[in-house]
Image (cartoon, rainbow, N blue to C red):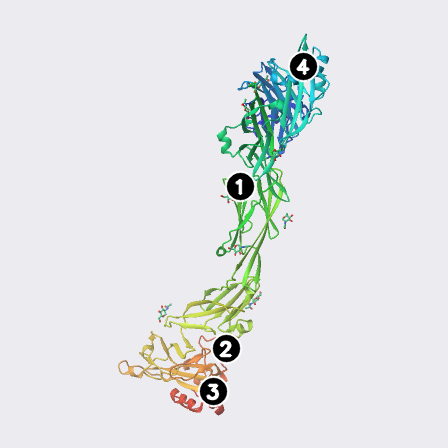
Amino acid sequence: MAFGFFLCVILLLSVWDNTTKCDYIPNEVLHMECRDGFFMIAFEFPFTGNEPRFDAVDDTGVYPITNQYATECGYSVSVLPLLGYVELRASYFSCHTNNKDDKVFTFNFNLIVTHEGKEVTYALNKTCSPTLPWSPREITCEVNYMEVSVRNEVTCPCTSKRDDWNAALNPAYALAASDWQVMLHRDGEQLMPISLYEARKQGYVFQLTDGRLVFRTPYGQPDSLSTEVNGVPVEVIHATLFSRQNWVVIMVDLVAACSMYEGSYDSGYMIWKTPEVLHPLVSGLNVTQVNVGVKGELVAQPVAEGRGYIVELQNSTVQISIPYNAEGGYRKSFVSGHLYEFYIFDLYLEQISVDEDNVDTRIRFHKTLATPLLPRPVFTENRTVLEERTFTIYLGDVPEDVELASVYLNGQEFTVPFTNAGSHTLSKVVHPNNTHGYTLKVPFDDPVVIQQWSKEHEETQHRLDINYTLTVLPENEPYYHLASVMALTDVPPPAFEAICSESGISFKLDHRPFDYLWEIRIGSDLLTSELAAQRGYIMSNDSQSLLLNVPLFTHGYEYKNFTLKGFFGTFEILVQDHETEVQSSTVKTCPFSTTELIVCSTDGRMTVVADLSLAVPSGGVPAQTNLLDEYCGPQEADDTRALFSFPLNSCGSIVKLSNEYVTYANEIFFSKKGTLKNPVHWSNDIDRVIMRCTYRLDGLHRLFSLHRFESDTAGVGRIVHSAHSTEGLSGPTIEPTVWQTPVPTTRLSPRPGYHPPAQYIKVPSFLNSISKKGATGLSQTKVTLYFGL
Ligand SMILES: *[C@@H]1O[C@H](CO)[C@@H](O)[C@H](O)[C@H]1NC(C)=O
Ligand SMILES: *[C@@H]1O[C@H](CO)[C@@H](O)[C@H](O)[C@H]1NC(C)=O
Ligand SMILES: *[C@@H]1O[C@H](CO)[C@@H](O)[C@H](O)[C@H]1NC(C)=O
Ligand SMILES: *[C@@H]1O[C@H](CO)[C@@H](O)[C@H](O)[C@H]1NC(C)=O
Ligand SMILES: *[C@@H]1O[C@H](CO)[C@@H](O)[C@H](O)[C@H]1NC(C)=O
Ligand SMILES: *[C@@H]1O[C@H](CO)[C@@H](O)[C@H](O)[C@H]1NC(C)=O
Ligand SMILES: *[C@@H]1O[C@H](CO)[C@@H](O)[C@H](O)[C@H]1NC(C)=O
Ligand SMILES: *[C@@H]1O[C@H](CO)[C@@H](O)[C@H](O)[C@H]1NC(C)=O
């Protein structure tokens, strides 16, 4: 189509003429066909163009086919602008058709198309030879006119209608001239005869062809009769044409009768009716056959049945029922508040009847049927799968002439196709039943989704209001379809990322909108900046994320798998819902290595890795060391270090109790047992290695149970190397790798310069005395035992 127009535009530009003749038009858009009794010209044009027009052309001139002219001269033009379709039907007996012996008909016409403001005229022609012989009487009930043609030769003056003929004769005899005259009848009344010229002026056209007399009239003429037959409206025109030639008066009765039934719609069917007998003069006769077709073309019976056409004779009325969406019809979507559709069907019907004298009458009906506006809802379906955390909404049953132009997601417009700006996507699905659909996917955490915490359900509500803008093509009329989806999800507890470092573990939490629902705990303590400061955690918290750096040996670590090479430290952060107390945790275990360490566990175990390089005399090895109890040897030792791990109150540990603290102490000795075999050289500045674990008394549940020890918190451990201490054993001690809040040393350490005699308290005996005195006796007696090692 475009190509054809293109050629013509070039022509136009070069000629600078508003009406250019252009004889090229592509076959795809122009269809010219021969049908029974008429030419059928169909042309497809683009929606935006003006409606095409037609001129009828013959030797005498060019005749624009206007509405009025069409009804008088046998043309019928129907335009479906929204479908870009125009159809011209021209009767073989139309005014400007070249007729050769009623056998070959040639129709010359102009098709005038407006293209880019310029009119382009295509001179076209079509020649047809009817395949069927002409019936003695042919009646055409076109959409805009009635036409009847009868065989010209005078056959027998039929006896049954003699009265009629006689009635017509009297005035006819008196007034008839040698020229043809016409007398119209209305409701049994005869009107004054008029000349053919006068009749033409009144819109009646009579034509005498080679073998036929043709009479045509628009509907609704003053002389036509509108009546009802079996409840069906019928219009009848009855003209008697006569001519007196000498003593013979030739009269021809021309009667056309057409059903004026508008069409109706019932339960999915478009219905049209025509009485079996339209008029006694037309079909006083029995209907012998009814054929149905579409767009001026009959279809064979099986095909008609296959398409669901129903032809019934009811109450002497022929009733045709066509399924609303039958093949061959047109469909169009329409917006009027809601989305509707309607169907148009060009019904073509042929009724063949036979009168008593076996003379055929063939009646052709052209009728455009239309359905009322039928609701054509589109639907949305919630295809969300919660686990995908994405809304999936399907918009379906979108008719083929409707397109999605844009989507408002919670009021924010996104035109189709989506640019890849957001995380939401749209895909189109086409179905074989001429509908299509769109699948919209919007992740729950897309910024357009509205999130609300539902306290009642203890879930997050994700909400998406969708306003689809659909446009009906080609006129681009918008239609809005609304949908709303909602989903509830559990808020997953915030999860920390954790990274090991040499000196501790770093935790990171990216803030989310709903994290205020959760509180962060270390053990049973709420994480606050105060707690962090108190325990030596390094915390930073901005609007983006929370960073928590937990140095090794700070409160909250658990240790295991101690070896000389290293050990594992585990730190756990708990996340707890305020209300439900549902907890989740992030646990991170990292490998660490140190040269020395002391760990005083909550279950009463002292684990020590000590550097003994100065404590072992030359020639000796750390493996030959032991604790106060000489039977407690190292678990592991290398050239310089040894690992001891033992219950606090074993291996000869010395216990010291104060008002608030209990301290367990032990010492690593070079084993003198080994000296015999491996002579060692003792020196005076040999390093003494003393380990102490101090626990707060108020955190202890069981102090000196033989079987169990329980403390809320780990003890504070120290390894004291006399060799490193400038103040000797009584001086302030170094605290290797211990960063916990130090227990006030004044309570535990001897006062400077004061060296009380060491008191060794055997744990079992002390335990006995406590249990005898009872727990309160301890505080009443205010036992203050200082000891030094
Ligand atoms: C009819 O149209 C054809 C092209 O379709 C053309 O060749 C022929 O000359 C035309 N005839 C008349 C009489 O215009
Ligand atoms: C038949 O037509 C008559 C006259 O119009 C009407 O009264 C009657 O109801 C119709 N019967 C049926 C079954 O349609
Ligand atoms: C018309 O129908 C009537 C009865 O319905 C019948 O008697 C008559 O023979 C039929 N005429 C023709 C020509 O079929
Ligand atoms: C068209 O086909 C699709 C897919 O089979 C179906 O979901 C839809 O309901 C159909 N629509 C109509 C109007 O038949
Ligand atoms: C849907 O969007 C259109 C276009 O913006 C607007 O006119 C209409 O009011 C919207 N409908 C609703 C219910 O929000
Ligand atoms: C949509 O589907 C989801 C997932 O199946 C469901 O949770 C939700 O209640 C549904 N309904 C609406 C109106 O969103
Ligand atoms: C971190 O800051 C956010 C506000 O940015 C606050 O809601 C949250 O309670 C803070 N967290 C901690 C542990 O201080
Ligand atoms: C820690 O030691 C235990 C045995 O005490 C062992 O099963 C486990 O695999 C060790 N863990 C690591 C990480 O080596």
Location of the N terminus (image quadrant): top right
Q: Earlier in the sequence, mark 4 or mark 1?
A: 4
Identity of the amino acid at label 2?
Answer: Thr
Identity of the amino acid at label 1?
Answer: Thr
Element on which disc 2 rests:
loop
Location of the C terminus (image quadrant): bottom left
**Residue identifier under label 3:** 658
Q: Earlier in the sequence, mark 4 or mark 3?
A: 4
Identity of the amino acid at label 3?
Answer: Ser
Q: Would you say the beta carbon of the disc 1 residue lies within 8 angstroms of ligand 4?
A: yes
Q: Are marks 4 and 2 in contact (CB under 8 Å)?
A: no
Q: Is residue 409 visible?
A: yes
Q: Nearer the viewer, mark 4 or mark 2?
A: 4
Q: Are marks 1 and 3 in contact (CB under 8 Å)?
A: no
Q: Are marks 1 and 2 in contact (CB under 8 Å)?
A: no
**Residue identifier under label 2:** 741
Q: Are marks 4 and 1 in contact (CB under 8 Å)?
A: no
For label 1, count other residues whose C-alpha is less than 10 Å away and answer few (under 14), some (14-19) or many (20+).
some
Residue 174 relative to residue 391: left or right: right
Element on which disc 4 rests:
strand
